[in-house]
Image (cartoon, helix red, strand yellow):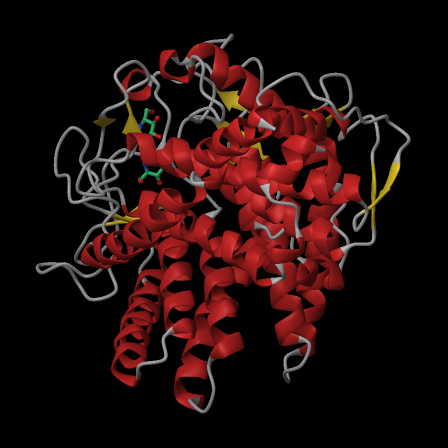
Amino acid sequence: MKIVIALIIYLFTMHGNAELPLEIWLQAQEKISIQRMMQNISPSGTIPGTVIASPSKNSPNYYFHWIRDASLTFDQVVTLFKNSKDVDQRNFYLHRIQEFIQLSQKQQFAPGAEGLGEPRYLVDGSADTIAWSRPQSDGPALRALTLLNFLKILSDNKPLRLETEIVIHTDLDYIADHWSRPCFDLWEEVKGLHFYTQSVQAASLWAGYDYFKNTQDTEFAKKLKSAALAVDQELLKYWDREKKIIDASRDLTHLPNSQYKYSNLDSAVILAALHSYAFDEDRYRLSEPSIRRDYFLPTALALELVFTQIYDINLGSNAPAIGRFADDVYFAGNPWYMTTAAFAEFYFRVATVIKKSEFIQINELNIDFFQNALSKYHGQEPSLHLTADQNIAVQSATGRRLLASLYYRGNSFLETLRRYTGSQGEMSEQFDRRAGVPVSAPDLTWSYAGFLSALQARAVFLSSGMSSLPKPIFLLQD
Ligand code: NOJ
Ligand code: NOJ
């Protein structure tokens, strides 16, 4: 009896309580992130609609409007607009979005040397003429996706709808014509073909097709569909059967040295899963992506293992801080806030997909990923062993336990993020791999946007009835 009581107290302090402080931190950090993200939108002295990547003007100078960062940020603003009940607040967000659309139109019209492949603009809206890695063609795809999301929730505003359609049309037309052209990757370092870039391109073409097929412009819809089908085929070529990972890039022509990025293992692939909605049912309604969801799982696990090994701060931690790729040297190559947030989001999204299905089929590709989540959750040798041909009913005890372990693993990544967030809730671009303190660009807009995106994925998972899932105590007793 004494042992049982001691065990219950132990479990409660170790696990039952652990949820509470995280929950409180998440709520506070959400507010701070929204506030700090919004501060980087149209700060004084910039043309309205501008998103500075960070207020930092030197070492590094991030006082520019990157299309990629800006589009991912505005995707969060669109969500804030959608979720705000207060009329003034709604109008405030709507106004910001409108400014972004107007600025986008201006930039598309006077785009600079690489046309729509220009990665970034000056804060007065004009083209950047500084020597830089160009072209980069993920930007137009991300912008189109953000604006298509916006149109889904915009009602009764015909002029704004038409204006937005024009911007989307221009972006998608560019993508349909240029998707096969080599460009620089999202990290602005290597030139070739990239899984991230082509994934978001495919997603935007499909989403665009879905939208324009219901308009007068059916010819354009057809063009988008045929490009989308072609990019989907292209995506298959990144699957590395031997290494069991999705490769980050192919046909690289511009490399700092021949060994650089030899592993081809890059967290850009996990960002690709998130930003191309690979775990979203809507994406599947249009067309099943050629890259199977199961391909992402061993890739994610391989990344977790690599970062566990290379960063000192990951020693003994449950969920490792995540960086870009192993041989990164930018600011000495550290973990990043937004890639760590992406892993949390990834677990929540995987868990949500599973929760909506009836069965989960364990196979050679996904078994290690699931087994790892189960064992990490227990913090001891796994007592539940999966086998590669197991078909688990999601509602069975095993299924629910697996689901719970994925959700709690997402939380563990948020715990890791919390450990390295500044005392005022500030997130820079990276945190030092040894000291764990914020480094590189302070107040990186994308760090906040990435965190907010992870929170939403968590909320979606929880809103579909987490109460029916086993709590940690049950998991440990099981
Ligand atoms: C600046 C880029 O934005 C960053 O991603 C890259 O690692 C460095 N330049 C070094 O090329
Ligand atoms: C460097 C990152 O590699 C790139 O993806 C980003 O767009 C810029 N910094 C600005 O944040």
Q: How many marks?
A: 0
User: In the image shown, does 11 or 83 lie closer to the viewer?
Assistant: 11
The location of residue 351, given as percent across then percent down, is 65, 46
Q: Residue at x 63, y 61 (%)?
A: 465
User: In the image shown, does 138 or 132 lie closer to the viewer?
Assistant: 138
Q: Taking the image as drawn, is residue 54 in sight?
A: yes
Q: Is the C terminus in the top left, top right, bottom left or bottom right quadrant?
A: top right
Task: Classify 90 as above or below 430.
Answer: below
Q: Residue at x 68, y 64 (%)?
A: 223
Task: Classify 309 as above or below 142.
Answer: above
The location of residue 58, given as percent across then percent down, is 12, 33
The location of residue 311, given as percent across then percent down, is 40, 14
User: In the image shown, does 36 or 216 lie closer to the viewer?
Assistant: 36
User: In the image shown, does 408 or 362 lie closer to the viewer?
Assistant: 408
Decide if residue 285 is on the left or right side of residue 170. right
User: Quadrant location of residue 186?
Assistant: top left
User: Quadrant location of residue 234?
Assistant: top right
Ligand 2 - quadrant of the structure image: top left
Q: Is the N terminus in the top left, top right, bottom left or bottom right quadrant?
A: top right
Q: Residue at x 75, y 31 (%)?
A: 366
The location of residue 147, given as percent across then percent down, is 46, 67
User: Quadrant location of residue 374?
Assistant: top right
Task: Classify 327 as above or below 426.
Answer: above
Q: Residue at x 69, y 55 (%)?
A: 228
